[in-house]
Amino acid sequence: MRALLVVGSLVALLTAALGGVLSARLRGAASPRDRAADRPYLLIVLAEFAAAGLGAAVLVAANWSEYVPVLVCLVVGLHFFPLAPLLRDPLLRPLGVALCPVAAAGLVTGLASGVSAGLVVGVGAGVLLLGYAVQALIRAYRPA
């Protein structure tokens, strides 16, 4: 398991580095920023942080802190639905669809077994988000 975490971490680091390089190159390109999307984007992200933060506080107060990762995974999955049209990325929808069952699997596993809900959610969400990041990077290097 440790070897998989190291490999996943290295792939994530490489993906982030390549994404940073690509972003820096495109910053000077003639791709104008859509300022009309700034406000809705900010509102969606603020709602996401508020829902995750307030929900986490409630779970901690109820002594259910082990389920905070489940809530965060669900909120992150749901926030991709309004972001997909705003960012003009239809692949955010399947990512959101995939993250919601991961959250449910973490909840069920945490309630029904001795396996940590956070472990299930962390591995599942990590794999999905890394997969999305890699394909987004590939799409950016090979524009349609």
Image (cartoon, grey):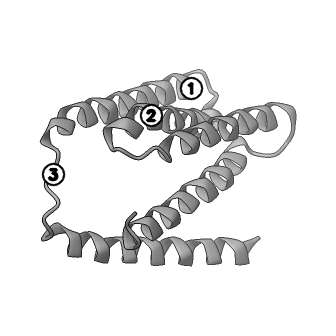
Which residue occupies 66% across, 46% down?
121
Residue 8 percent location from the top left of the image: 61, 71
Sequence order check: which comes first, mark 1 or mark 2?
1
Which residue is label 3 attached to?
Answer: 33
Residue 34 percent location from the top left of the image: 17, 45
Q: Amino acid at mark 2?
A: His
Q: Which secondary structure, mark 2? A: helix
Q: Amino acid at mark 1?
A: Leu
Which residue is label 1 attached to?
Answer: 59
Q: Which mark is residue 7?
A: none
Q: Residue furthest front?
A: 144
Which-is-in-front pick, marks 1 and 2?
Answer: 2
Q: Which secondary structure, mark 1? A: helix
Residue 18 percent location from the top left of the image: 38, 77
Q: Which mark is residue 79?
A: 2
Q: Quadrant of residue 51?
A: top left
Q: Which secondary structure, mark 3? A: loop
Residue 60 percent location from the top left of the image: 55, 29
Which residue occupies 40% across, 31% down?
82
Q: Is residue 47 left or right of residue 65?
A: left
Q: Please, is residue 68 above or below residue 9 in the view? A: above
Which-is-in-front pick, marks 3 and 2?
Answer: 3
Which-is-in-front pick, marks 3 and 1?
Answer: 3
Which residue occupies 70% across, 51% down?
119
